[in-house]
Image: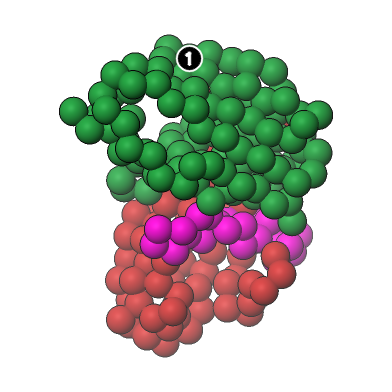
Amino acid sequence: GIQVEQSPPDLILQEGANSTLRCNFSDSVNNLQWFHQNPWGQLINLFYIPSGTKQNGRLSATTVATERYSLLYISSSQTTDSGVYFCAVGEANNLFFGTGTRLTVIP
Amino acid sequence: GAVVSQHPSWVICKSGTSVKIECRSLDFQATTMFWYRQFPKQSLMLMATSNEGSKATYEQGVEKDKFLINHASLTLSTLTVTSAHPEDSSFYICSASRGTATEAFFGQGTRLTVV
């Protein structure tokens, strides 16, 4: 399957700070999504973004498909942003997940 | 968005018994659904593709006789963990999409503990 790497693996932020999470993948893809996994395991859809740039409130994402990477930006972080962020990619609907970034936002 | 519902949310079973997990797409039809497994503090691993009306496709290393998948309708896929053992304890989660290479939506997940 497609190899997906995320960085950094762990990130600790002061509330109000900004951050950038990165996702690199090994092959061309037609499907790329970012998720936030809450403490109960639920995957919250953040972005469906196989290419281009999208924004939703304090979050935005950019995927450069030709260079096989995607970035997730979190601005003005809040304690509720804490959790694990996953990037997942695929050619169709079967997704290969990255290793995740564990974000901790401290007040 | 779209709603995918998974049941049960958690289950504890005795070693040697079988457990069935249901995954339903509530507001759309899905010819394919996907099953993933996640061990603590690890990523999600694709186990198998559930195909409506035909056999499931399993990823390399996943025992098809251990993890039985049935996709009898366009809105329901089931995963049965047969003869469960403690090493099968994990978080199992399903997904479905409205179309090909479109946004995937996940169920709430099922936490299985085998004692």
Q: Nearer the viewer, residue B72 or B24?
A: B24
Check the image and report above or below for B74 versus B7: above
Magenta span of residues? B35-58
Chain A takes which shade in the image?
Answer: green
Q: Which quarter of the figure has residue A34?
A: top right
Does residue B78 appear anywhere in the picture?
Answer: no
Q: Nearer the viewer, residue A104 or B79?
A: A104
Residue at horizontal 31 percent and vertical 31 percent from the top: A13
Residue hosting label 1: A56
Q: Is residue B51 left or right of residue B96?
A: right
**Residue B54 drawn in magenta:** yes
Q: Amino acid at mark 1?
A: Asn
* Outermost residue to the left: A107
Q: Which chain is red?
A: B
Q: Nearer the viewer, residue B24 or A80?
A: A80
Check the image and report above or below for B72 versus A81: below
